[in-house]
Amino acid sequence: MNEDFKNVIKQSKWTCYTYPYSCIIFETNIVTKNFFNNCELLSFISDNNYYTLYTDGSKSELFVRSAVYDPQCKFGQSFLLDPKCSVFTAEVYAALEALKALKRIAHINSFNNFLILTDSLSMVQSLTNLRFDFKKNYILYNIKKLLFSYAKKGIQVSFMWIPSHRGITGNEIVDKIARDGTNMLDVSSIVKVPLTDCYQSIDNQVNSLWVEFWKQDQEQKGKWYGTVQEKLPVAPWYNKLKMASRDFVTTINRLRFGHSTVPAHLARLGIVESSYCTFCNNSVGDIEHFIFTCECFSFDRLILVSEISDIVQNQVTVQDPSRRLSDMLKNRSYYVPLYKFIKNTVGKL
């Protein structure tokens, strides 16, 4: 696991506490106008005498790239990031590179009114709402630092969100630059991976360890529950039930765990002497006997079969249950009929 996170940013202080307060609270200038075609956008840019830069981020199974495109000089460049970086990090790093380029452009061309255009609404919103938060992407604070320094020099930088796939030429060009890796510069070893981008990877690895432990544990104990719950659950089976009574949940849980007050289980624990069914006295009184074979509950069993058959017919995805209780308990659709059968026969488990 340590090898997977060697390129993650490591600091003695959280990034949000390394910059002055005035820098963090500096308001990012956001242009909120919406343009849904290229002509309207270009007219707006011309009327306000903006120098524009388009940014984009792209992530696939093979790469993570940022890109910046300058339509004034018709030049674009892409930047290769660590594959563990998120597409959001690719978007914000593209904005950071655009801001770095502004220093050179402002010096050579004497421009002081810049507009950075991006199709990442989440980045624009993050810059707008950025305050002291250790969970925020550290590159956002680097962007704030540059914006603050430019403002003190009289250079105005604004951000504007533009919709993607709407025929906006600059956005389509920068998107292609990011995907194709045009004029690519490899910064994967320089740009550290934000800790926030590792949350999913950490979650996946922890989940893998749990699954491995889950399988190993079932070799020693919990074999019955393992046949019912084959995969590690992320939430209790009753998590989304709105009208489930405590008795309903308790009864189904006891069926799922295999721990109940039937004679076979109580005899195994040494609580009662006989493991035979207390209703028919003809067979071992385990839970499968009560549900499938006990002759005292034949009529109730017909009702159970009828209700389950209705469920199978009304739900295309529900398969016809087998004669094994563990298979029936894998399908939550059968829980209500099973519960009703238990309440009408043995009463409680």
Image (cartoon, rainbow, N blue to C red):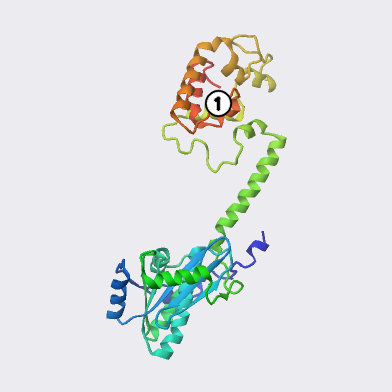
Q: Decide if residue 287 is on the left or right side of residue 178.
A: right
Nearer to us in this view, 76 or 29: 76
Displayed quadrant of residue 234: top right
Mark 1, Cα crowd under 10 Å, few <14 / some 14-19 / many 20+, is some
Nearer to us in this view, 12 or 262: 262
Residue at x-position 70% and y-position 41%:
216
Instruction: List x then y, in percent, for residue 237.
Output: 52, 36
Q: Is residue 162 above or below residue 103?
A: above
Question: Which amino acid does the dot numbered 1 rest on?
Answer: Pro
The quadrant of the rendering that contains the C terminus is: top right
Q: Is residue 254 visible?
A: no
Q: Is residue 295 visible?
A: yes
Q: Is residue 259 above or below residue 278?
A: below
Q: Decide if residue 27 is on the left or right side of residue 301.
A: left
Instruction: List x then y, in percent, for residue 115.
Output: 37, 77
Residue at x-position 51% and y-position 23%:
338
Residue projecting furthest to the right: 220
Q: Is residue 85 above or below residue 152?
A: above
The quadrant of the rendering that contains the N terminus is: bottom right
Tell how many labels.
Answer: 1
- Residue at the spot of label 1: 321
Q: Decide if residue 50 is on the left or right side of residue 87.
A: left
Instruction: List x then y, in percent, for residue 232.
Output: 60, 41
Instruction: List x then y, in percent, for residue 341.
Output: 50, 19
Query: Is disc 1 placed on a helix, strand or loop?
Result: loop
Displayed quadrant of residue 329: top right
Residue at x-position 64% and y-position 46%:
210
